[in-house]
Amino acid sequence: MEKGIAHVSYSKCMACGICVGTCPFGCLVLNKTGIDSLNKAYPELKPNHGCTGCSLCARACPVDCITIHP
Amino acid sequence: MKGYTGKILLVDLSKGEIKEELIPDHVYENVLSGVGLGAYILYNRIPAGADPLGPDNILGFVSGLLTGTPSFVTGRWMVICKSPLTGGWGDSNCGGTFSPAIKQCGYDGIFFSGISSEPVYLYVDNKGAQLRPADDLWGMDAIAAEEKLIAENTKNKKPAVAVIGTSAEKLSLISGICNDGGRIAARSGGGAVMGAKKLKAVVLVGSKPIGCVDPKAMKEISSGLAKKMRNVNMPTFVKGGVLSLLGKIMGGMKQTAPLDGMLIGLLMKRWGTISNNTMGITSGDSPIKNWAGSVKDYPFSSYKKVNPERVLEYEERKYHCYSCIIGCGGVVDISKASKGEFTHTHKPEYETCLAFGGLVLNKDLDTIFYVNEILNRAGMDSISAGGTVAFAIECYQNGIITKDMLDGLELSWGNPESIVALIRKMIAREGIGDLLADGTKAASAKLGVKSKPYAVHAGGQEPGMHDSRMDPLVGIHYSADPTPGRHTIGSGQYYDMLHLWEQVSWAPNPGFYTKADEYIASEKVALKTVAMSCYKELTDGSGGCLFAMVMGISHWRLFDWLNAATGWKKSADELMEIGKNIQSLRQLFNIKHGIDPMSFKMSPRMAGEPPLKDGPNKGKTVPIEEMMHLHWKAFGWDEKTGVPGKPLVNRLKKAQIITAEVK
């Protein structure tokens, strides 16, 4: 497993929120707007998130839009 | 892991005991998880004739088989119980974030029996479960109680909370169970069952991973859907006003053909369910004036006030449930509408907009916003509440409810102040509100036989806001389903968009057809409703959402996801048999509890008896009794009585789904 933290690729992300519900530490939040014309909220790491890079979110993502890297 | 955890949690509230139980694979292979798992537990364990509000009733919170897997729009959870509203099988489902939380605690479902002596709530995390006192929460509205529980129980991860409001505490038979700030599993009266058990809430903070057999295959299916959904966007120059025109065209069409279900995705992404606010009125889909009126009673000058574009003016942000890529929800600003009492409410659904709009001839959008929020907080079903207000108005207009019963309220059609005041009384069970808080059937029984024509329901449950005189197939589902009055089970319009015939050998392909044919009881129509029911039960066993389901089997690929998650290699026909198992088990539950299926036949008005004199549904009648018989026959149930036949019962026994004695 690569060391690092979760990074979201917004060109692939569908804002479904599965990653937010999966993270065992509550690091992600649906808060990032300005991505699409409907202004939906997309996932991002919270400030002081404490992401361990466990990759559970990446494995759960249906479209593989999360990668773990520094 | 095959998508399911294979484990449930059993909580005996009378004894304060909590234990786990393993569920064998064959249960999931025959009835899936979700509503199917629930039917398996409740059918075998609730004694015949149990009081729905007594200790023998079992209240279940179940997740879907696909919830938490890399699939889209599969995050709904279900409440199941013996319904105090209908006396038979009860279920209701809701989105938000509660469904994955059940599985992240390690369970496919949590089942409550008994009655607690004091108010309690259940807390579950990775370490285990415990019952905690809830005296300080009792009497709080659902949103306030949820906020308090989240504040008290958040360490890292925000808890998921299912909670009742005051309406359920007061055992209103039209109360539901809330989550995620006032979203509600509203139907079947599950809230009253929870209130009777003195269970205020369930708080879940698990973080166990949810696995499936072939995540790669699941992601390939999901990526295909994602690609399509990304490209489905209504052009911004198209405004909501065009929808009433579209409705008018649809309502006037004599012939039709199956549409691509992605149209639903298009409408839902832009407006949500309110896309039907005006389209439904002009097409004849929306029942007006307690099902006795038409667009003539609620004309353009009225329905333009609930135009979806007007609602969107107040939408501050979009909202979507866990795993959803449609995002039909929204949060609207109601500080003006509530005169400062509240800041926001969930964007009212079409059902609420119509139940407190055209059904009662109200054209004041602020009232709809406000009523939406107070009902969500109280945890009362807005469909049943709106239907009951319409019933009360008509009773008053006909001298059955008199002025001295109303504490000064003037119950005229379209009177916003009276509507709000009456809802407040129903929530508080004050005065006439106490009589109305259990829905139309119970109120009519107290008011006498003269009120019966105005009590619009099926088997005690107020119907959804979709007119069976416009779509007779929805009438069959309203009447012949084990949970009557439910618009979410099926309709002709839904069926056409599913395109099941592309994969299911026996599902009829409607092709280009004459609408008038649907008003004639026929085996083809019956078979369509059976296919629809089976597929809906599969959806409810999977945690799927109706709006994704109606996008169609080639877009929202339920069959393929189920096989990829479980490792099964079942054909579409074999999977549909699972749907048939679930539906038959729900019907057998009703038979066990003494329900005569024909007693669920919808009110005469809903079948066009007498026929309407105006509007798109003018002169239309539905031969509902004949249609119910044919629906049962096509299911393999007794054509006359609606009792599932011996071959089906034996199949369920052989599969060890039925373990209790069948009489």
Image: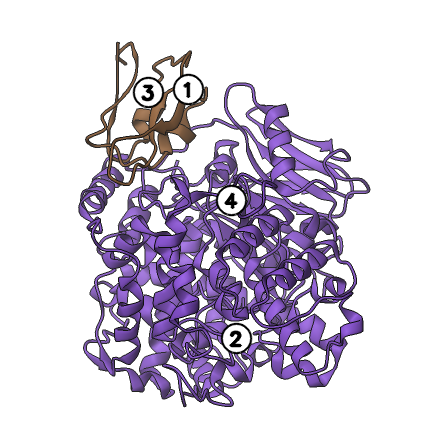
Residue B323: % across, % down: 36, 40
- Chain for mark 4? B
Residue shown at the point (43%, 71%) measured from the top left: B286
Of residues B218 and B659, the one drawn nearer to the viewer in this rendering: B218
Q: Secondary structure at mark 2?
A: loop
**Residue A27, labelled with which disc?**
1
- Chain for mark 2? B
Q: In which quadrant will I find the C terminus of chain B?
A: bottom right
Q: Are marks 2 and 4 on the same chain?
A: yes
Other-residue count near label 3 (Cα within 10 Å), few / some / many at <14 / 14–19 / ≥20: many
Q: Toward which corner of the image does residue B588 lie, by quadrant?
A: bottom right
Other-residue count near label 2 (Cα within 10 Å), few / some / many at <14 / 14–19 / ≥20: many
B451 up-or-down from B652: above or below: below
Give the chain ID for the purple colour.
Answer: B
Of residues B253 and B562, the one drawn nearer to the viewer in this rendering: B253
**Residue B334, labelled with which disc?**
4
Gap in angstroms between the C-alphas marked 3 and 2: 55 Å
